[in-house]
Amino acid sequence: MLTISQVLIALVVFLLTMQFLKLQRARRRLPPGPIPLPILGTFLQLNFQFNCDLLMKLAKIHGNVFTLWFGWAPVIILNGFQAVKDGMTTHPEDISGRLVSPFFRAMAKGKGIMLATGHTWKQQRRFALRTLRNLGLGKRGLEHRVQEEACYLVEYFASMKEKPLDPSFPLFHSVSNVICAVVFGHRFSSEDETFHELIKATECIFKFGGSFIHYLYEIFPWLMHHLPGPHKKALSSYDALSSFARREIRRHKERGVRDEPQDFIDFYLAHIEKSKDEPRSTYDDDNLVYSINDLFLGGSETSSTTLNWGLLYMVANPDIQEKVQEELDAVLGPSQLICYEDRRRLPYTNAVVHEVQRFSNIISVGMPRVCVRNTTLLGFPLKKGSIVLPNIASSLYDPEQWETPRQFNPGHFLDKDGNFVSQEAFLPFSIGHRVCLGEHLARTELFIFFASLLRAFTFQLPEGVTKISTEPIFGGTLQPHPYRVCAIPR
Ligand code: HEM
């Protein structure tokens, strides 16, 4: 007679075997890759790791289009410039969906821009782009805000009187003030307590992104939902951002609709009113809250982290810093406002800014997309709902595209006469229908902030410090290890 536990074990073994066979059948029609196991997918073969370098190694074994399994879900990885570009642009509309994974759904409920898909995403993204343009994106209006914040930042560094400082907070403060002014209609002072809470919440969310517990949540959401841990903290940090956005919306509503909308919330509230009789309208308070979160999170952490890397690379490469300064001195006056158009007269500085972005590779592996209909991806038929992940880092470090991919080398963006040259494989903002919505703003910010700081100061290590790490800390974005610099006025 079999005992109950023997029956149970036999049942589990039977179910796992069936599942294993089902997975093997499913993988036959997908791009190649490691053999998936029930529940764990391919995590065991990857030693429970997941990063851009590992994906580049796997591409050497399986080719530039391969499949990994996250639990039950196959994920098609695109590796190397050509596969990323062709995969994302041959049928761009077909892979414009976003993977609203369990954790993303717990955060943003499928609303807003970044973590939304389908009709909601289309409406929210289109509206945000149009409104950012109305508020001066791509024109002098928004550039003026960036210049203003760059001046405050220079003043702040000067006030430190050459004392060692960690630049991450002042950089975050200045960069996020640009997007805050656009979205909320006001900037924050550096002492503002609410602002410090927003920064803490942002840090917590980005730290959690891509962590082991994050992956566990994606595979076992029902279990993790009931357990304490960092996932709870990340979710409550996201809720803190949402509560702040709701308070700002309330403030705008209490003030009443203005004749001339001044900020993103004004434009959005007016649009809710205008579209209230449209049956397919997705314009409502919730989508506004999550769009605000997307603009704040997308618009603060990314550009400020890139600038943080920029200063670190300048400290680590004083010869490059000096060359940038020579060019700035030769072309610009000492107090003239720097504008984005000046990059055309400053090819070396422009090349350094690009190289900072390429080499720091802050997004690392990009954000997952989803096929919104049956399609063909680089010769492989994919069903609607298939997940596609472009490995952005593999384009930024592609040995076939860059002379010295693993070295900081501004020459990647210069021809032999010192003119700036764009590179197709430079894809830090991704590519295709969901390319970063803030690309133009980010490029403007990076150039103006970087040039303004290097014109005003030489950055160097505090006395007695000789070593500095340029290795990243892994998380939602790749961060430098905390470091301190002295800003010496020039
Ligand atoms: C150095 C700065 C930045 C980098 C490297 C960066 C990079 C990216 C990347 C790789 C994506 C994913 C695109 C995809 O799904 O393939 C993205 C999406 C997005 N970014 Fe940025 N970004 C930066 C700055 C900004 C700024 C300043 C804003 C705000 C105005 C912003 C707002 C967004 C939004 C809303 C999305 C979601 C787009 C969508 O899903 O349709 N980003 N960004």
Image (spheres, rainbow, N blue to C red):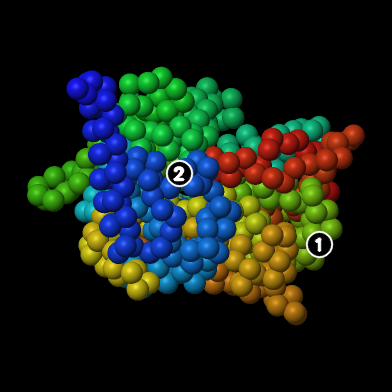
76 up-or-down from 101: above or below? below
Q: Is mark 2 within 8 Å of ligand 1?
A: no
- Image position, residue 227 (x, y; %): 37, 21
Name the amino acid type tagged 1: Lys
Label at residue 323: 1
Q: Is mark 1 within 8 Å of ligand 1?
A: no
Decide if residue 401 is in sight here: yes
- Alpha-carbon span between mark 1 and mark 2: 46 Å
- Image position, residue 242 (x, y; %): 36, 31
Q: Nearer the viewer, residue 27 or 361?
A: 27
> Relative to residue 207, is residue 246 drawn left or right?
left
Q: Nearer the viewer, residue 413 or 472?
A: 472
Label at residue 43: 2
User: Splitting the image into 4 quarters, where does residue 174 fall?
Assistant: top right
Dot 2 crowding, Cα within 10 Å, few <14, some 14–19, many 20+: some
Q: Nearer the viewer, residue 51 or 262?
A: 51
Return the residue found at the far bottom: 417
Which is closer to the viewer, label 1 or label 2? 2
Q: Nearer the viewer, residue 369 or 74?
A: 74
Name the amino acid type tagged 2: Phe
> Relative to residue 111, is residue 278 drawn left or right?
left
Residue positioned 79% across, 49% down in the render:
316
> Relative to residue 341, is residue 89 drawn left or right?
left
376 up-or-down from 241: above or below? below
469 up-or-down from 414: above or below? above
Residue positioned 28% across, 57% down in the render:
26
